[in-house]
Amino acid sequence: MGIFENIKVAFSGLLLNKVRSFLTMLGIIIGISSVIGIVTIGKSLSETVAGGFAQINNAAIYVNLEPKEGYNYPDIVNDDWISEENIKKAEELYSSQIKSIAIIGPFVSGTINTQRNNVKIKISSSLPGEMDLSKLKIIAGRFLSYEDVDRSREVAVISDKVVEKVYGNDLEKALGSEIEINASNSFRVYRVVGVYKYEPFNMGVFGGDGEEHPTNVYIPLSVGNAQFYGNNKYWDFYVSPKENTQEAIDKLSEQLKSFFNDGIYKENERAQINARSFQSQMSQIESVMSNVKLAIGAIAAISLLVGGIGVMNILLVSVTERTREIGIRKAIGATNADIRAQFIIESIIICAIGGIFGIILGTAIGYAGSVFMKQPTFPSISSIVIAVGFSMAVGVFFGYYPANKAAKLDPIDALRYE
């Protein structure tokens, strides 16, 4: 019997027992849909995290306070915070390795007051290194300079969204103009020295900037300290290295930790300094995500295993029910290979159809999950091909034993079977 005839016979058998065939496929459907859904949601999550990190210089090193053993974050007091003086010492000591340093003061909400309207903004008190950290693209003028910081100049760098709302997209009109900013119950006039291209920060379900989200207005750190904070101590800061290799980043991270912990914070009972790159944080996140996907994937694999066993059991029942049919086929010339092929093909068809339904269901689940995470995506072609191939492999593996049992039936005994 040819392969097409075997396929025809297999389909006929499935259609004769529709409910049983569907229940047999159910384990395969659940297993494949779980795999596809998990892969799709994992892909969406990876794209979400990568999208957020893409807007930050991932070679940058994040330096921050953390409690020593036996203490918690609330135990750290303001006196423990990192002074601007000590940050400058670290920058001078490792000047051959450090490209720039970014200190970002707490964001302050405010408005730019104009005759046309009031534009909501967020004020970020920054150092020039903020440009390297946030990968800001200056489209007109310049960013803040160290001279602006040292002389406490009341200058500002605004976004193109602010230019659109205040100056009607006229960049030339914006540069050099003065804007009145109302923040923390005080008014202050700043001169615009630069305009940057606004790129919405998007972390999907974890948050991000909406269409009407207030954009940052960057002012010198010294000006922000004087107006809003009243001190020059910080919880954290960022270092952009000159060399972006992992070896150089790791070396500088260790040097910074040693500089602070073996010296400035050696006698501090409560606080210490940690330093790690965004690359290492991204790697940690990816590692956690991979472990989660592996764990859920293992559960899905168990579901496929159960589904495969279900296919094998049903085929064994089918062999028993069709014993006389097998005997008749052998009596009229069917070989063991013909009988074996018939049942293996039937098993493959059951698993392949279950796999197709599983892919459809898994795609729907994965897409719904990715929409919830605000990063809509579909499964990759490779994952679909692997899912189909795997379901067919399950069919071959679990279909072989019943098929071989059918092939070994003695035709005389089979014809006598009632």
Image (spheres, rainbow, N blue to C red):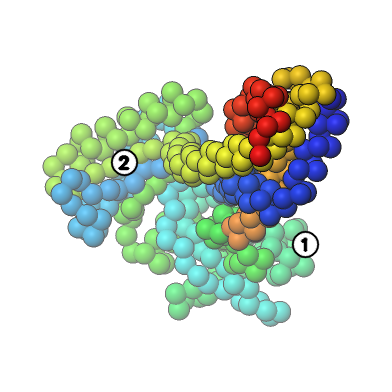
Name the N-terminal-most of marks 1 and 2. 1
**Quadrant where the N terminus lies?**
top right
Would you identify the image quadrant in which residue 93 lies? top left
Q: Give how far across and how far down residue 369 sits, in percent.
A: 60, 56
Three-letter code, disc 2: Asn
Q: Give how far across and how far down residue 134 sits, in percent.
A: 55, 47
Question: In the image, is 392 to the left or to the right of 168?
Answer: left
Q: Give how far across and how far down residue 268 sits, in percent.
A: 16, 46
Q: Which residue is mark 2?
A: 274
- Front in this rendered view, residue 261 or 5: 5
Secondary element at tag 1:
loop
The number of numbered discs placed on residues in the rendered structure image is: 2
Label 1: how many residues lie within 10 Å, few (<14), some (14-19) or many (20+)?
A: few
- Front in this rendered view, residue 179 or 158: 158
**Quadrant where the C terminus lies?**
top right
Alpha carbons under labels 1 and 2: distance apart: 44 Å
* x 42%, y 61%: residue: 106
* x 63%, y 65%: residue: 210
Secondary element at tag 2:
strand
Q: Does 365 sit above or below residue 340?
A: below
Three-letter code, disc 1: Asp
| Cβ atoms at labels 1 and 2 below 8 Å apart | no
* x 79%, y 42%: residue: 11
Q: Of the residues tagged 1 and 2, which is closer to the observer? A: 2
Residue 101 appears in the figure:
no
Would you identify the image quadrant in which residue 321 lies? top right
Label 2: how many residues lie within 10 Å, few (<14), some (14-19) or many (20+)?
A: many
Q: Does 399 sit above or below residue 15?
A: above
Q: Give how far across and how far down residue 79 sits, in percent.
A: 21, 55
Mark drawn on residue 170: 1
